[in-house]
Amino acid sequence: MYLFKQKDTLDRHLSTARKNGKRIGFVPTMGALHQGHLSLIANAKENCDVVVCSIFVNPTQFNDPADFEKYPVTIDNDILQLTDAGTDVLFLPSVQEMYPDGLTVKTHYDFGQLETVLEGAHRPGHFQGVGQIVHKLLDLVKPDKLFMGQKDFQQCLIVNRLLKLIHSPAELVVCPTLREPDGLAMSSRNMRLNPAERQNALNIYKALIYVKDNIHIASFSEILNSAVNQLKMNKFDVDYLSLVSVEEDGTVTFPKEMSSRPLYLVVAAKEVSSGVRLIDNMQM
Ligand code: PAF
């Protein structure tokens, strides 16, 4: 696996690959890699000739400085996992390399309604930060395909919109969420949970299953209220637990009853004793 820390050396390497007709698959990450990330790499390997992974804990997307400080960093283990998975190129830049002019936001992306609901409402500025870094990385890697996980439901919608805004030809491939055997969605943030908190975190998955099992039995609002109450009883601060659909134009709506459109339950809640905020979603 080639490891590049500088943009120009990565650019030179990928320019040659592109000239040789290689199709580039790109998996952007913030490290602390787990099987979920490795499934993105595997998907990229199946569909592309050269697989590029980036590891960069992007400061501009953390609306909470404490979350940034505590974000797990496991770089040696990440490199081993990426090598074993057959990754061709790892891009591991510094903050200075990605933001040579400082962290002040210079470009504003018009993400419209998507930035005002769910994660957008609870993490102000987060998606602008995601937009900035994904834009910079896309300009550099110029992938044919970009692989991201369904667990970051709204991030996938934002990136789809970004691709249109910046006229990128890259195709976004959204890969299924990987879960632990008991159902907990794999996440780098799970590393911050002690065994008791890890056990409690499972209540997020249980809430998704509870809603899925009862969706035809009572009204949406009754089921959602009941699931929120269960989470609160298990010491979660719930930011949102909502049933949403995605419209043709990429915006989300909050249906009150079943329709022909696919329906997703999306949740974000903080496990209070650890202070770790977890997100998850499931198609109903
Ligand atoms: O999902 C992530 O890990 C990050 O938001 C991303 C897409 C790598 C941008 O920093």
Image (cartoon, rainbow, N blue to C red):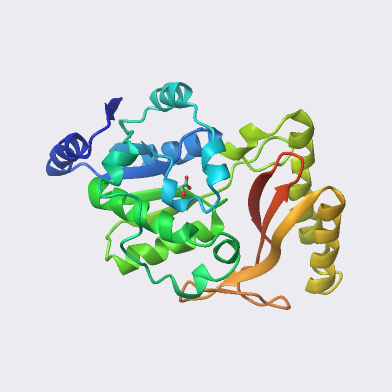
Which quarter shows the N terminus? top left
Please count the marks in the image: 0
Q: Quadrant of the C terminus?
A: bottom right
| Residue 183 location (% of width, % of height) | 71, 41
Q: Image check: 12 left or right of 78?
A: left
In this rendered view, identify the residue nearer to me: 39 or 97: 97
What percent of the width, then of the height, locates residue 90? 33, 32
Quadrant of residue 224 in the image? Answer: bottom right
Relative to 131, residue 148 above or below: above
Report whether residue 116 is seen.
yes
Q: Residue at x 68, y 57 (%)?
A: 267
Q: Residue 76: image x %, image y %? A: 44, 21
Q: Quadrant of residue 162?
A: bottom left
Q: What residue lies at 83% left-to-right and 66% top-to-bottom? A: 225
Locate residue 27, reporting x and y percent: 39, 43
Q: Is residue 217 left or right of residue 239?
A: right
Determine whether, in the image, residue 170 is placed left or right of residue 148.
left
Left or right of 45: which side holds 65? right
Q: 43 or 125, which lies in front?
A: 125
Residue drawn at x 56%, y 36% is 70
Q: Nearer the viewer, residue 30 or 207?
A: 30
Whether residue 144 is visible = no
Which of the 4 quarters of the picture holds residue 29?
top left
Q: Residue at x 63, y 76 (%)?
A: 260
